[in-house]
Amino acid sequence: MFLRVFSGLFMMTIFFMPLSAQAQATRSLDDAVRAGSRHLQERFPQGTRAAIVAVQSENREIGEFVRRKLGEALVNANWFIVVERDAAALAAIDQEMDRHLNLYVSQETELFIGRQLGAEIIISGWIARFGQNWRLDVSAVKVETAQRAAQWSAANIRSDPAWASLGQLPVVNQPPVVSQPPVVSQPPVADWPSTAGRPPAGGRPPGRGRPGPEARASFVRVDGGTFRLDRDTGHTVTVSGFYISRHPVTQREWTEIMGTNPSRFRGDNRPVETVSWFDALEFANEKSQRAGLTPAYTITGTGPRRTVIWNRNANGYRLPTEAEWEFAARGGTVCRRNYAFPGSANPDEVAWHSWNSDRSTHEVGMLRPNALGLYDMSGNVWEWVWDLNGLPARAAQTNPAGASSGNFRVVRGGGWNWSLMGRNLGVRQHHLPSMTRNDIGFRLVRPKG
């Protein structure tokens, strides 16, 4: 029996590996879409009827701009029969994006559109900004079988001057405007609250401690709600609204704050790892102080027996509680599907794990996000949360923070070396807070108020 299971897993690994091309470093969007077109040509015969459903982004205009660019590359290649979207398809896309509130189009909707247009494959993608550059992910799914047959990614795409006016986004090498941060009209990009609803013309008032444009772009708003914890089906909890970072803290972010890089797998846009729970708290405090915010933690002592007090009234950065982490991973109040993995029933769409990671971490944001636009909630690195290990009271609670005593802190989500077993949403481990491993990192939250 064991041999049959192992053989099946091995064959699944062989099947999935060729479908995905590793992220390719590119210089321009035109380079990226041409390379993506060539990759798709290698996977499908000439004359295949293809519908480019949508390229999703935090800005709808940019997503549509990139979709048109990809369509032009496919047409110019004279390989595919590119089927144009009709009014019904556009209406379905708009309805889905408005329902999810984050420009997300589910595969069910994509397949519906593909069947309606008589396409053999549907092509879709994501375009997201990381730092000053962009990352494009393109995948193709067979309409008849609903199976993904190709996936390709491009990293380090420089900003195109033609995009700049679409979403008031700065072109690379052009300094962003500090006195008037860009207004983001589409959730889930974090919109830090102010009494007037928008920043004053002269910038943030001194002493308010609000993050600047860079922090705004990297955090996602999560509205509060009530849900049932995956690890304890009888335990219902309620969490208040908060902001959570779009992806795990990267090595670039860590180095800018802490001055060193402890990671085993080096790369500016890879998640920082080999950091302890204590290290994560110190990073959060330092980041808060640099932003003029009140640190969330008071840390006394040294070594593995440090004492930590969490000031819940602080407005600074902190680790999420386990309940906050799981609520965000599920998609908060936005996602209406009970996926086994954050954002998908297929782990290869959303997670770097032991079958596809090539035994290392990967740059953040290379796979599909969940319904809130959060990347790498599954796989890549485990993520420290605040909670001590242990089951809280089974009665319904508001904003639970874990067990009241214990020696171990919880990590969630799985890492690059984790073998998939069952549902990933409920997977959890616990470790001493002083322990470091090359498959554990973290992401930050901030209170909504």
Image (cartoon, helix red, strand yellow):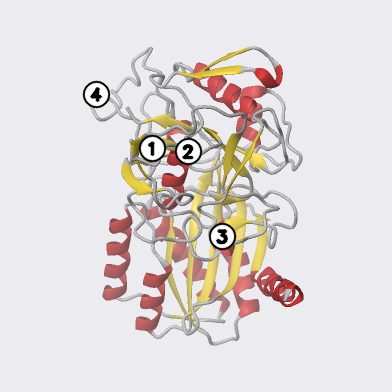
Is mark 1 in CB contact (under 8 Å) with mark 2? yes
Q: Which amino acid does label 4 sit on?
A: Thr
Q: Which amino acid does label 1 sit on?
A: Ala
Q: Is residue 120 left or right of residue 165?
A: right
| Residue at the image point whose x is 35% and y is 40% from the top | 395
Can you identify the residue that label 4 sits on? 195
Q: Residue 290 at what x, y percent from top left? A: 52, 18
| N-terminal-most mark, 3 or 4 | 3
- Amino acid on which disc 2 is placed: Ser
Camera-side residue: 301 or 183?
Answer: 301
User: Which numbered disc, 3 or 1, marks the residue that appears first in the sequence?
Assistant: 3
Q: Judging from the image, what secondary structure is the residue with disc 1 in?
A: loop
Alpha-carbon span between mark 1 and mark 2 = 8 Å
Cα separation between marks 3 and 1: 30 Å
Q: Residue 190 carries which label?
A: 1
| Residue 196 on image: x %, y % | 23, 26
**Residue 30 marker:** 3
Which amino acid type corresponds to the residue marked 3 in the rendered image? Answer: Asp
Cα distance, mark 2 to mark 4? 22 Å
Count of picture labels: 4
Quadrant (top left, top right, bottom left, bottom right) of the C terminus: top left
Q: Position of residue 314 (x, y in %)?
A: 41, 19
Residue 218, numbered circle: 2
Q: Earlier in the sequence, mark 4 or mark 1?
A: 1
Q: Answer few, some or many: residues within 10 Å of disc 3's Cα (few below 14, many 20 plus, some between 14 and 19).
A: some
